Each structure stands twice: as C-alpha cells, then as structure tokens.
Amino acid sequence: MAGKLLGLLEALTAAQALGFGAAGLVIFSQVGGAGLGGFAILFAGAVVLTAVFLALLPFSRSAAEAGAAPAQLPWPWSSGSWPWS
C-alpha cells in the first residue's frame, strides 16, 4: 500500500510541477524574479497538502472496509424528486 501511495504522490507532484511551472513562467515573464520565492513556497505547500491527504487515505479505506456507512448529505433531491421538476 505504501508503494502505491508513494507512486501516486510522485505522479501528482509531477502534474502539479507541470501546472505550477507553466503558471510560473507566465508570472515570471510579467513580474520578473521578484515573486519567485513566494511561488516556490506556494508549490511546496501544495505538495505538502497532497501528501497529507494521501497519508489520510488508508484511514478512510479501513473505515469503508469495516462497513462504516458513507455520510448521507441532505440534498433536496435525495427523496427522488429533482429541484426543477
């Protein structure tokens, strides 16, 4: 399980690096290097949040495997009727 989560973290970090890298190039072309440090902190925070949520994943899986019922949200159409009908 840990190997799968590490692989998923690696893939998500690579995707974030591509997205933030493209946005970073645009920001760098407009502002220059002034905001580079803050942008690096933003990217690092996004990677840390991704790692935290992936670390919580085994706990949610074990609860689901133990038979815990998913939360029922009080949607207006949960009774079978749609809001526009």
Image: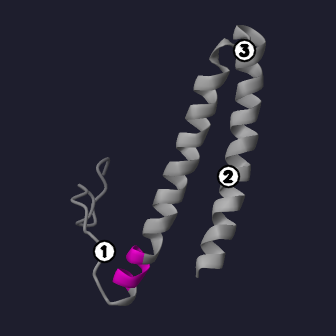
Vertical position of residue 29 compared to residue 74: above or below: above
Farthest residue, direction top: 31
Query: Which of the numbered marks, if any, corresponds to residue 13?
Result: 2
Q: Which residue is mark 1?
A: 70
Comparing labels 3 and 1, the label whose residue is closer to the camera: 3
- Specify which label sits upstream in the sequence, 3 or 2: 2
Residue 19: quadrant of the picture: top right
Q: Is residue 64 left or right of residue 54?
A: left
Q: Is residue 66 above or below residue 49?
A: below
Question: Which residue lies at the image location 58% right of the left edge and 48% below the top edge?
Answer: 47
Distance Cα–Cα, label 3 vs label 2: 23 Å
Q: Earlier in the sequence, mark 2 or mark 1?
A: 2
Q: Earlier in the sequence, mark 3 or mark 1?
A: 3
**Identity of the amino acid at label 3?**
Gly
Which residue is painted at 32% across and 47% down in the image? 84
Q: Within the magenta stretch, is there residue 68?
A: no
Where 81 falls versus 21 (above or below)? below
> What kind of residue is marked 2?
Thr
Q: What range is drawn magenta here? A: 59-64
Q: Which residue is mark 3?
A: 33
Q: Position of residue 74 (x, y in %)?
A: 21, 59
Residue 35 has which mark?
A: none
